[in-house]
Image: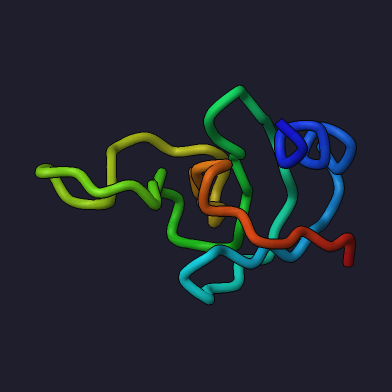
Amino acid sequence: MEAYYNCLHCKNKRVRIMTTDGKQHEGVIVDVDRNNVYLRTKGNGRVKTSAFSPYGNYYGGFYGYGSEILTLSLFTLLAIALI
């Protein structure tokens, strides 16, 4: 639950998130639910998820030109910092 409240506090702010697998992601938190944080990053305009899926990692749908929404599981968050 601590990760959830930390992400809520940082909503609509630019952050750098480190996950338990050592990856770092930068962007603006656009939404948070009890399981995931949604990070708007620079990208190719597709929705991307960090979870494994038999359909691949990219799903259709656009969220603004040139931006990508990355879905990260709250269970994989190691650290979050405002930048």
Quarter of the figure with residue 47: top left
Residue at (66% x, 30% y) in the render: 32
Q: Residue pushed farthest front?
A: 1
- The residue nearer to you, when weighing 11 against 45, is 11
Q: Quadrant of residue 33?
A: top right
Residue 63 visible in rendering: yes
Q: Relative to residue 74, is residue 62 drawn left or right?
A: left
Q: How is the image coloured?
A: rainbow
Q: Specify whether 74 is left or right of 30.
A: left
Q: Quadrant of the N terminus?
A: top right
Could you say where residue 77 lies in the image, as x and y percent from the top left? 61, 54
Q: Which x, y percent locates residue 26?
A: 68, 65
Quick one: 67 or 31, which is closer to the camera?
31
Residue 49, how many percent across, how many down?
Answer: 38, 47
Q: Residue at x 54, y 56 (%)?
A: 66
Quarter of the figure with the C terminus = bottom right
Residue at the far left: name it.
Answer: 54
Q: In the rendered view, would you say 34 is above or below 15?
A: above
Residue drawn 86% across the image and 48% down it: 13
x then y, percent, for residue 9:
89, 36
Examine the rendering and report whether any part of residue 69 can be seen. Answer: no
Front residue (pair 56, 8): 8
The quarter holding residue 31 reads: top right
